[in-house]
Image: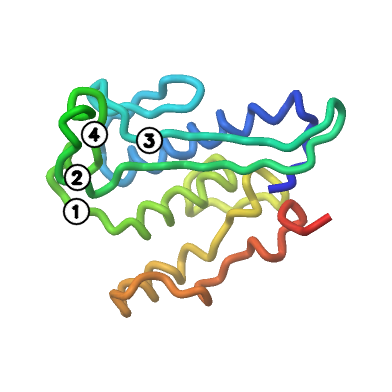
Amino acid sequence: MRPPLSPASAPALTLMAGVAAHAAISSTTGLSVDIRWPNDLLINGKKVCGILTEMNAELDRLHSVVLGIGINVNHREMPPELGAIATSLRIETGKVYARAQVLVSLLPRSSSGGPPDQPTPRGSGFACLRIRASSWPRRWASSQAGPSRSAGTTAAKSPWLRAK
């Protein structure tokens, strides 16, 4: 991303991603999710999501940010060395989740900070990640082959992602 932020403001992206992932996981699963600030989400005291942010900046200019959100979705079990500290949505609920649906739930929240059915103001939040959430699940469900590249990403149009 190439957000119009100062380097001092860039850590807010990690916090915004945490809030968005919290809302998406909570609404998808109905589980109580805790945020261990600034970058981990926990269910029943075990890590289910991690957020990493890397930036390329000078003292007064942010060049780019790479934001990674990792959610443990469909693990049946964790390796023995992680079983006491990590979990997945499937372990906690006993349900299998479509990863694309979890993503669809996450991205609109990342864009606006609010529910996915609310309009996103242009340029707010992670607007560069916004997708046409209404078409992607339909295409994915009908094909069962996963989302296609023509699912309607707007990332290519974002000024945050343009090469400088």
Asked where in the image residue 161 lies, by quadrant, the reply is: bottom right
Q: Earlier in the sequence, mark 2 or mark 1?
A: 2
Q: Earlier in the sequence, mark 4 or mark 1?
A: 4
How far apart in space, not on screen, are marks 3 and 1 (Cα)? Answer: 17 Å
Q: Position of residue 156 (x, y in %)?
A: 68, 65
Q: In the picture shown, does residue 100 fall above or below 1? A: below
Q: Amino acid at mark 1?
A: Val
Q: Which residue is mark 1?
A: 96
Looking at the image, which residue sits at the far right?
60
How far apart in space, not on screen, are marks 4 and 1 (Cα)? Answer: 14 Å
Q: Which residue is mark 2?
A: 90
Q: In the picture shown, does residue 161 fall above or below 43? A: below
Q: Earlier in the sequence, mark 3 or mark 1?
A: 3
Q: Position of residue 136 (x, y in %)?
A: 44, 69
Point out which mark residue 3 bears: none
Q: Residue at x 38, y 67 (%)?
A: 137
Secondary structure type for disc 2: helix
How far apart in space, not on screen, are marks 2 and 1 (Cα)? Answer: 6 Å
Q: Which residue is mark 3?
A: 49
